[in-house]
Image (cartoon, helix red, strand yellow):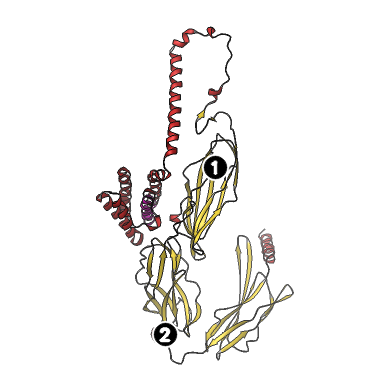
Amino acid sequence: MMKYFHIVLFVFISVSISAQAPKFYTKVDAKEVLEGSYINVDFVLENAQGSAFTPPDFDDFIVSSGLSQGTSMTSINGRVSRTSNFSFELTVGEPGSYTIKPASIKVAGKVHKTLPITIKVVKKKKNAASQSDDQFIRVVLSDSIAYTGQQVIAEYKIYSKLDVRSGNYIRNPEYDGFYVKDIHNVRGNSQRVLYKGEEYIVKSLDRVALFPQQTGTYDIGPFIFKVGVAKKNRSNRGFFFGTQLEYFNVKSDSKKLVVRNLATTAPPSFSGAVGKYQMKTGVAHKSITLDDAFSVLMEVVGNGDGRTVNPPAQEFHPSLDVYDPNIKSDESYESQGRWINKKSFEYLIVPKKEGRYRIVPEFTYFDTDSNDFVTIKSVGLNLAVAPGSGTTLRKSGDQKISREEIKPLVEVSSISNMDSHFFNSFLYWGIFSLGLGALGFLYFKKWKIVQDSRIDPLTKKRNAANSVAEKRLALAAELIEKGENKEAYAEISNTIKKYIAEKYTQDYSELNTDKITKILKDQNVGDDTVSSMRTIMDACEMSIYAGASDLSVRDNFEKTKNLIAALESFH
């Protein structure tokens, strides 16, 4: 049985490999080197099994090591690929430009050749570099100008002529004014480069994602690293390997990052997304009745600060009642050296009239490349609403009547045939009272609808501030239960800012402790309440960058509830 299994597996792998086009190319670890240095050259064959490999004539180089061969096979989502490497180490000579000529190999009887590659050899400086030039650390930012909520990658690269094996912070950085997420698996292969006429081996020591929370100009660095270097009596060329090390403190340079505010003329569907985003929408049922409600689902994926992305406001048909949207899921993950956030929102909708409706949800984000707002529109969701089963019918507006209320009239021969005692019975007066009460209720509801329609939208938004705060604090409570104290503190801080922004119609991105203090004092809020707010916000700042205990986060959670209650009762 195992024999047949191996045969089937071999056939499967063979078919999978044959379905992919072969690739044959040359790869070098540096295209510009100093005279007397070396180059690692790989001739790589992918997606095929080759024969009769023929290397080029290395007339302009000295083959200091080679030929070495290696083969590997990988399977990703059922797709199998095969890679063969033919490797050489070449020593270069005098300054000038030299060409690595094509190599050849046969695949299924056909000869494949690589493309030539040009190598530039640079003359060494006459004066030898000082010991301080042997290694240094540079801060590399993905952007020098950013916006609040944008993801900025800060990478710390060590340039060294020595055999560096390790590098760690003397003291972990503090990024005041930023929400920070570590990026893992950054210490990949080293790279040889020329920098100011000198050859260095470059490797990443650390990489972090910075999300600016406030505008301003910030210095990223300098930071001090403890670097482990192989002792000089060791001849290994490996990077971050070995056992006997000596250590040096190496100070990085620093870079300035300017953080700007977003444009003030944001579309209504902008809800805090900054960076690059995609959106998709869907509806669970395309055909319903007036007895039912339905949900519109929206999923957004992007590289901005996901904590500030909320369900965007939508404009649907006036015959559709839309409830406050919910956040159904919220997750973040690493992809290609950056953090990606994915959120899904649910809009619960109740139709008031039968008919056909076309729903076109929108999502707006601030594009950091074009420095402008970009609105993504759905292709359109079609919905058919039927009258329903008849057990629940509708009058004008939201008023519901039952089937009993629209029974056909009963024809009688004479009113005198009815029992005259009925009109003086308890049953009659009971029915009369119920009918009178129903009319009173319908009148009150109609009056309430009219009154609500007269309320200024700005007032409605202010009245909804407490509801929004309670929902946000519910998320903070969940984070506390999970032991994610830093995230809980960040959510508490966002709750206060969002509440203030909606309560007093302020720009969320411009809010900080001092700005909120001024707003509250302008509203004549008491000193005790203002002081409580400052205490909570200071605790949030300290926790986000220095950590916090379970006790402190729970205490500040309760203080935040009391703060919002106090502000609600004040106005």
Judging depth in this view, the residue of 545 and 373 nearest the camera is: 373
Q: Quadrant of the N terminus?
A: bottom right
Q: Is residue 62 left or right of residue 305?
A: right
Residue density around tag 1, few if under 14, some if 14–19, many if 20 or more, within 10 Å? few
Which mark lies nearer to you, 2 or 1? 1
- Mark carried by residue 523: none
Judging depth in this view, the residue of 5 and 132 nearest the camera is: 132
SS category of the residue bearing label 2? loop
Segment colored magenta:
481-500
- Seen at 47% across and 75% down, the residue is 203
Q: Is residue 208 visible?
A: no
Give the image location of residue 521, x and y in percent: 28, 52
Say what amino acid the circle numbered 1 marks. Answer: His
Q: Quadrant of residue 48?
A: bottom right
Q: Is residue 440 visible?
A: yes
Question: Relative to 168, does residue 544 appear above or below in the rendering?
Answer: above
Q: Earlier in the sequence, mark 2 or mark 1?
A: 2
Say what amino acid the circle numbered 2 marks. Answer: Lys
**Within the magenta stretch, is there residue 66?**
no
Q: Disc 1 marks which residue? A: 317
Q: Outermost residue toward the right? A: 109
Question: Relative to 312, does residue 7 appear above or below in the rendering?
Answer: below
Question: Relative to 558, does residue 449 appear above or below in the rendering?
Answer: above
Q: Is residue 278 left or right of residue 516?
A: right
Q: Is residue 65 left or right of residue 487?
A: right
Q: Quadrant of residue 110?
A: bottom right
Q: Quadrant of the C terminus?
A: top left
Please identify the dominant SS of the magenta region. helix
